[in-house]
Amino acid sequence: MKQILGIGSRINHPEYGKGVVTNVTAKMYWVTFIDNGLETITPDDDFEIIEAAEDEVDTVSFYEVEKSLRNILKKWNGFSEIVPIADKWKGGTIVLKPGDSNLASKEIPIDTFFHKIVMLRDRLRVMEQKINSSKELGEQDKIDLQQYITRCYGSLTTFNVLFKSTSQHFKGEGSANK
């Protein structure tokens, strides 16, 4: 019989990759994987235990798990956030079809396209942080640049349909958070 894992345990799953157990029930583990987001697996699944946490389920707060997960992800790959694609788009393609029927269409794996959208969002966030922490820029310059970045986020809201979680959506001028 396999060891029962507690919240915060780190595993390596042959299908989903490396992840952290974020919830435990009698019949399954809820695991947040670096590359695949949140998945549920049974304790009998085939996976390698990297580091077992044996705490009782009720003794670890969600905040502590989230904090540990962020630290682990930074330690492993420098990721700051897991951004899974919506399930209905996994494995799909985007087809770019030119108006001229004599020209060839271009197919792009939707996962590749989504990854580029997420990278763009992350780079906008880094730019925003650099602007806000800049010693050289005046307050009005920071405000002007911040408004421009907010409008960029707004221009990208079309791609929100690709995100699994609405909390990770792009938000423009009509929203308080990005």
Image (tube, grey):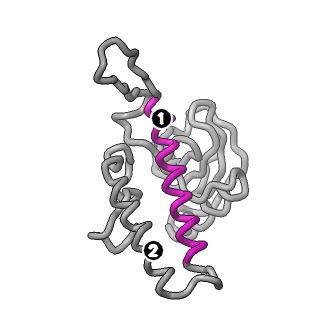
| Residue depth check, mark 1 versus mark 2: number of the one nearer the observer | 2
**Can you tell which quarter of the image residue 3 is in?**
top right
Asked whether 127 falls inside the magenta stretch, the response is: yes
Q: In this view, does 119 lie to the left or right of 172?
A: right
State the residue at coordinates (69%, 43%). 49
Residue for badge 2: 146
Quarter of the image with the N terminus is top right
Q: How far apart are marks 1 and 2 (CA)?
A: 29 Å
Q: Where is residue 162 in the image (x, y as percent from the top left)?
A: 37, 43
Comes first in the chain, label 1 or label 2 = 1
**Can you tell which quarter of the image residue 46 is in?**
top right
Q: Which residue is more in the foreground, 100 or 118? A: 100
Q: What residue type is labelled 1?
A: Asp
Relative vertical location of residue 129 with respect to residue 20 in this rendering, above or below: below
Residue 59 visible from this viewpoint? no
Examine the residues drawn in magenta and state their main secondary structure: helix
Residue 140 visible from this viewpoint? yes
Q: Which residue is more in the foreground, 168 or 65? A: 168
Report the magenta residues as a range. Answer: 109-131
State the residue at coordinates (30%, 19%). 100
State the residue at coordinates (38%, 15%). 103
Residue for badge 1: 111
Secondary structure at numbered mark 1: helix
Relative vertical location of residue 161 with respect to residue 144 in this rendering, above or below: above
Q: Position of residue 170 (x, y in %)?
A: 37, 58
Report how many numbered discs are placed on residues in the image. Answer: 2
Relative vertical location of residue 105 with respect to residue 8 in this rendering, above or below: above
Q: What residue type is labelled 2?
A: Gln
Q: Is residue 145 left or right of residue 127?
A: left
Quarter of the image with the C terminus is bottom left
Q: Position of residue 156 (x, y in %)?
A: 37, 53
Q: Position of residue 33 (x, y in %)?
A: 56, 45
